[in-house]
Image (tube, helix red, strand yellow):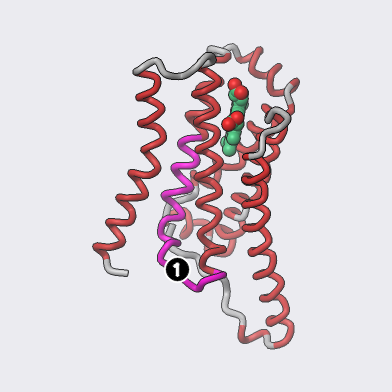
Amino acid sequence: MSRRTRITVKVLVWLACLTPLVLLLYRVWTDDLGANPISTITNTLGDWTLRLLLAALALTPLRLLFGIAWQMTLRRLLGLFAFAYAVLHFSVWVLVDHFFNWGQMLEDIVKRPYITVGMLTLTTLTPLAATSTAGAVKRLGARRWRRLHRLAYVAGVLAIVHFLWLAKVGRRDVYVYAAVLALLLGIRAWDAGRRALVRRRAPEKVAPAAVSRP
Ligand code: HEM
């Protein structure tokens, strides 16, 4: 892929990731948030956090299935956008739901399991965002960096549990997200199994998994 095409794709991804936020701000501006505005804002930001997280997690399975690698350069961008949406989602809870009432927040975290899991998800994503730079890969070393960034799948599972726990009976979208994550995890597991098998048969043939530039 040429440098020009790569830049165009990145600009398009930036625009695609910013569009939901701009649309949400427009709805705030035009007072078009429905009967429960806070819930609409929190849910929209939560939905996009999950979608972007799944999009970031889909890049490696795409490489494994189709042998294409250009999309790997988008991993950092999508991951950081997912984190940014997560921070906004969390900020609405801190600012609007509780207005910095730490005691009340702690109580909410302890009492409501879906909040506990939401916090765990955000906590899992934080070190990944903090180590998303090329410098961090160098400092940690490729192997440790790769191992740490597998936590993205743990964050994906936690995000689904968070959503499952809060979703009202009859909602189908949460199961669609869960199925997508299961498929992505299944592809990674299949690849790990295939590699282990080849390694056992001919150890010298297995190349270490690539760490693409974040
Ligand atoms: C970091 C990863 C997170 C993801 C991927 C995520 C995702 C979601 C999703 C998908 C929803 C439901 C949206 C819908 O109903 O359409 C949601 C709702 C919600 N999340 Fe999160 N969440 C995360 C973290 C958090 C954190 C850290 C908190 C607060 C501590 C939180 C608090 C909430 C609340 C209160 C709702 C329900 C809002 C309502 O129904 O009024 N989430 N989240």
Horizontal side of residue 201 vs 20, given as left or right: right
Q: Is residue 129 left or right of residue 195?
A: left
Furthest-left residue in view? 4
The reply to whether residue 115 is visible in this rendering is yes
| Relative vertical location of residue 19 with respect to residue 94 in this rendering, above or below | below
- Quarter of the image where ligand 1 sits: top right
Magenta region: which residues?
64-85
The amino acid pointed to by label 1 is Ala
Mark 1 C-beta to ligand 1 under 8 Å: no
**What secondary structure do most residues of the magenta stretch adopt?**
helix
Give the side of residue 4 with respect to residue 109, left or right: left
Residue visible at 41% across and 27% down in the picture = 24
**Label 1 residue SS:** loop
Q: Which residue is denoted by mark 1 in the rendering?
A: 69
Q: Does 211 sit above or below residue 113?
A: below
Identity of the residue drawn at 49% across and 17% down: 34
